[in-house]
Amino acid sequence: MTVEKEKLFKEIMGSYPTGVTIVTTTDSEGNPLGLTVNSFTSVSINPLLVLWCIDKRASSFEAFQQCSGFAIHTLASDQKELCWAFAGKEPDRFSKAEWSLSERNLPIIQGSYGVMECTVVQRIDAGDHTLLIGEVVELKKTDKEPMLYFRRNVGSIPENWPA
């Protein structure tokens, strides 16, 4: 792929508004791991399935390759700092978050718009990424407003957006 084509692809994809999530799991030693992800979507209602993609160069890639479950946190509009902390290279991302382990031993970040705990159903190799499909086994939602990602910025959904 040419550099020009890659740049254009990133511009198009960055102009596609999405929600923002943080995906978490634990490594083989029980340490919490997580990263900011906007490549997330629903797959099926029956059963409840979701998928997200992880770059094979991500520092947490091996842990997500080995884990049996993960938690998807749909971020709330007031979690901008957390979004960028989990998107960066900082090794101790969880020091910036209030979190606890769930009954399924998954790190759950407090204050998110919604949380879905998932069991890994399938991993699919896809170029420089791997797709993880998970079955939602637990979910919770708050009354907060969700976060929106658009052109490398995050924020609230505009107030004048139709209800």
Image: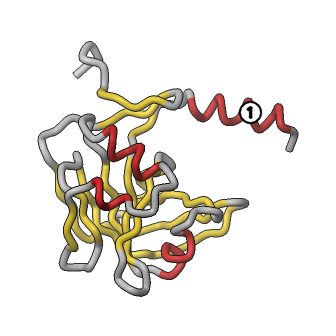
Check the image and name the residue furthest to the right.
Answer: 2
The residue to which callout 1 is attached is 7
How many numbered circles are shown? 1
Residue 25 occupies which quadrant of the picture? bottom left
Q: Quadrant of the C terminus?
A: top left
Residue 148 occupies which quadrant of the picture? top left
Residue 10 in the image, given as x and y percentages of width and height: 66, 35
| Residue nearest the observer in this picture, 5 or 27 | 27
Residue 23 in the image, given as x and y percentages of width and height: 39, 60
Q: Residue at x 51, y 31 (%)?
A: 152
Image position of 161 (left or right of 150): left
Residue 38 in the image, given as x and y percentages of width and height: 47, 46
Residue 131 occupies which quadrant of the picture? bottom right
Image position of 64 (left or right of 146): right
Check the image and name the residue furthest to the left.
Answer: 143
Q: Quadrant of the N terminus?
A: top right
Q: Residue at x 74, y 33 (%)?
A: 7
Instruction: Report crowding for label 1: few under 14, some 14 to 19, many 20 or more residues within 10 A (C-alpha).
Output: few
| Residue nearest the observer in this picture, 68 or 109 | 109
- The relative height of residue 122 versus residue 4 in the rendered view (above or below) is below
- The relative height of residue 95 versus residue 157 in the rendered view (above or below) is below
Image position of 52 (left or right of 163): right
Image position of 80 (left or right of 90): left
Residue 155 in the image, given as x and y percentages of width and height: 34, 29
Q: Residue at x 64, y 65 (%)?
A: 56
